[in-house]
Image (spheres, rainbow, N blue to C red):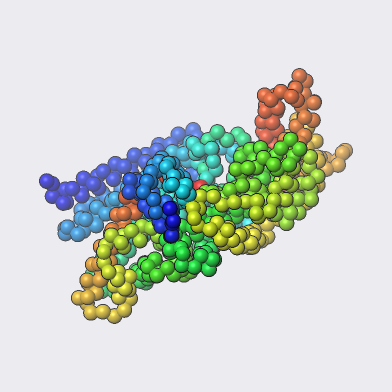
Amino acid sequence: MPTLEEQVRHDASSLYQFVSSITQHCDSKNPAAAYLSSSERFFKYIIELGQATKAYVKDFPGGRTQPPQFLDLRDDIATLRGSWQFLHLFVKPALDSDTLHLPTSLIQGLIERFREIPDYADTDFAIYHTDLFNYLNVQLNVFKTIADETAALVKGPKFPEKLALIGIPYSQSSSLFMNCLIPHEMGHHVFGDKGLGAKFRPVVEKELQQLFGATLTTLDRSAITNLLVRWAEELFCDVFAVRMVGFCYSFAFIELFDVSKALDETGKLTRSAGMTDFDEYPPHLFRLQQQVAILRKDKWWDELTKVDAHYVNLLEEVDLMKEADFNLSNFGSIETTKVKAAFLKVVPLIFSELDAVSAGLESGLEEWKSVCEKIESYLEHGIVPSNLLEKRGELKFHVPSLVPLLNSSYKFYVQLLDRLLNHIDHADVSDIKCRSDWATKVQMWTAKAIEDGNVLRTKGTS
Amino acid sequence: MTLVSVNMLTCKGHGVNILTLSCEDIYMHSALHWCKLSRPTEEGYMVSVNTDRTNYLSLALDARKTIKALMQASETGTETPQLQGAINDTVESLRALSSGELLFSHLHPQFPYQHYEQVKTLEEVESAMKEKHLADRLAELKGTVDPAHRKEIIKLAITFFSALENRALQRYNTSASSASGR
């Protein structure tokens, strides 16, 4: 059998190979591809951490002479391999996400919008593709902790401050409406960054202890606490997204999950059986109900109820649901009324935390009210709504902001697409493909308007 | 069947945790992010606990850091504030687990046992060590003890945190659930 030193030398070499196999993708990335600056920062970090990791093991034996020292290095190697397996998850998906394969203008617009929150004026997001049809946030407080503790082992660089990662479905690079869900992922970043999980856990745990007494062990209680905090996090991210971009988030949410299937032929919510249980996440209908609460609070609701669309009808119906309409399943003999009571205790905290973190963020409602009709008119005539003519005969233009653009465009798509089709020769309003094709164009025109707005605002001209 | 209490069971096959009543037949699909029992208990009720393997990696890295600090303390004779904090968090968590008291009431952002996977792993390692009064013995590091006894406690602590690191890393490597965020 080889000596311990020889064994560990082999292990060190194996890790060196493994790390090289990951970092070489960043080293030799396609020079023709352009990336967001946030992605470039991510790649640079991976390369530097890779260099530090390789230098650490290359230094072998590096003054080590005693068995405990070799064994300690062997433990380091095992943990480092785990860390690099974790980083491995993100490298290729991030490399695939060059600017041609991302909704770049929307992402830039959303990042700018996010930065309007005073605490996040210099936060950045690197975007990567995921095979899942789901939007993902890599919690920075988790990712950065892992990256920094890995770096500490090898004396490598710390992960860049205020750089978060978001995963989007690879297929949605040219979609605008579905990507209105991205602010939810930004909400996850805020939730982690503000330590809201750590704030909510003691509240939930204490409530459970009061309600259940000694019938739950500490371990059981921690399991339920984590589940309820996870629910709270999802709700927080939903209401955060609504506050950030308005009702277009709720529309995208309804569209993604086909929640309107809960409506019957009269527009009533009689087909919601099986859609009201809390499980891994809160039920969609409960989540929408909380979104309505924020829409109402932020004054979108009065405007939205004037919109004749089945998505709005659904929101109105959801708003009428009672707490008793929602159930908790899969809790066995645990009294679900108590679990629900513990959860409902934390719900008001979600809203107060939202108000605290988003203080200073203007809703965009007033601008939306003033430009919505005009944007709809532009879209109806196939015109990119970049520069809205303020007064006929005068060359004065208004460049609409992101929130009015997204909400006007989504409203147009849901409510008024027929108007556009009526202007198009040979377009058939009843033809699904035709509707789909023109809905895609509406998204492209809106994306172009967002891009133009980004450019003009960057230049400082209006 | 009359069921009295709820127990946290661990599937030996895949190491995924399930909150359920005591039951004989537990099977899980290792490829699912959200682990469900494929065969329900007679009563057909259970709570699945969503596992995030990232929490195991975090725990392993924390344990590694603590082990290095313990080795350094063994050489220098003094514990860093970070090491004292790590020992304190562990002692408090172990005590909460055995007493039924609140676990998260003294939570701080760097608390290493925030997530269910971490609490469960801590509990399992403590049980496996068969060391009576482990929390009390680790807590002795906080006080003044003679050097020989201190060395003994540090050795015990290193053994404990090594077991924690190994178990967490094994869980991280074998857990099928996603680490890619949510």
Residue at 77% across, 46% down: A304
Q: Position of residue B97 (x, y in %)?
A: 39, 66
Figure label count: 0
Outermost front residue: B1
Q: Is residue A194 left or right of residue A268?
A: left
- Where B81 sits versus A362, above or below? below
Q: Quadrant of residue B62?
A: bottom left
| A276 relative position to B96: left or right | right
Q: Nearer the viewer, residue A394 or B9?
A: B9
Is residue B23 toward the left or the right of residue A65 in the image? right
In the rendered structure, the answer to whether residue A74 lies left or right of residue A98 reads: left
Residue B36 location in percent, x, y? Answer: 45, 44
Q: Is residue A139 visible?
A: no
Classify B30 as above or below A70.
above
Residue A318's spot in the image, x, y percent?
A: 70, 48
**Toward the viewer: A182 or A253?**
A253
Give the x, y percent position of residue B74. 24, 70
At x 46%, y 67%, the residue is A214
Nearer to us in this view, A19 or A348? A348
Q: Quadrant location of residue A254?
A: top right
Query: Which residue sits furthest top?
Result: A426
Instruction: Tell me which residue sits at (34%, 39%) in the image.
Output: A21
As drawn, which residue projects farthest toward the left? A1
In this orientation, does residue A207 appear? yes
Q: Residue furthest right?
A: A393
Q: Quadrant of residue B58?
A: bottom left
Which residue is drawn at the image coordinates 67% and 45% (left, top)?
A: A250
